[in-house]
Image (cartoon, rainbow, N blue to C red):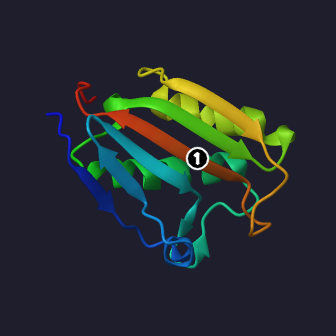
Amino acid sequence: MTSDAVRRVRGQDPWEEILGSARAVAAGDRVLVAGTTAFRGDVLHGEGDPYEQAKVAFTLALEALGEFGLGTGSVIRTRLHLAHARDVDEAARAHKELFGEVRPVTTLLVVEGFVDPRVLVSVELEAFRGAVDS
């Protein structure tokens, strides 16, 4: 199911309009999902809870993959950006629950902070369109 065409999907994040970006882009056999937080519209889910923010952010990122007919089994790379090193265990627990069977290549970074200081976690995904979905 590979394709050389580039397709972009917009989400509901206001930063997409500000930055002039897309939620996800498919190019060839890859689909990239932009940095995703636990915001649904104007509501931050899991405020103060890095586990919940990671779960919601990954769920939203996976919904973007769903626009291309892909799911968890297609994910080959994840990135987690955390505001605090103290949140590594909780964010890792959420990641393992979702991707433990898939085992994508994963990078975990602690960053200086986010535009909204309530955000504790931001995630990115990369998927392969030839992978078997689980």
Quadrant of residue 19 within the rendered picture: bottom right
Instruction: Please indicate, yes or no, whether residue 56 appears anywhere in the rendered image.
Output: no
Most extreme residue toward the left is: 1
Instruction: Please indicate, yes or no, whether residue 24 appears anywhere in the rendered image.
Output: yes
- Taking 67 as reference, is 93 above or below it? above
Apparent side of residue 118 relative to residue 121 in the rendered image (left or right): right
Q: Dividing the image into 4 quarters, which one contains the N terminus?
A: top left
Per the image, the residue denoted by label 1 is 123
The residue that appears at 28% across and 29% down in the rendered structure is 134
Apparent side of residue 117 relative to residue 34 in the rendered image (left or right): right
Residue 78 placement (x, y as % from top left): 53, 35
The residue that appears at 69% across and 33% down in the rendered structure is 108
Q: What residue type is labelled 1?
A: Val
Residue 119 placement (x, y as % from top left): 72, 61
50 or 84, nearer to the observer: 84
- Taking 106 as reference, is 30 above or below it? below
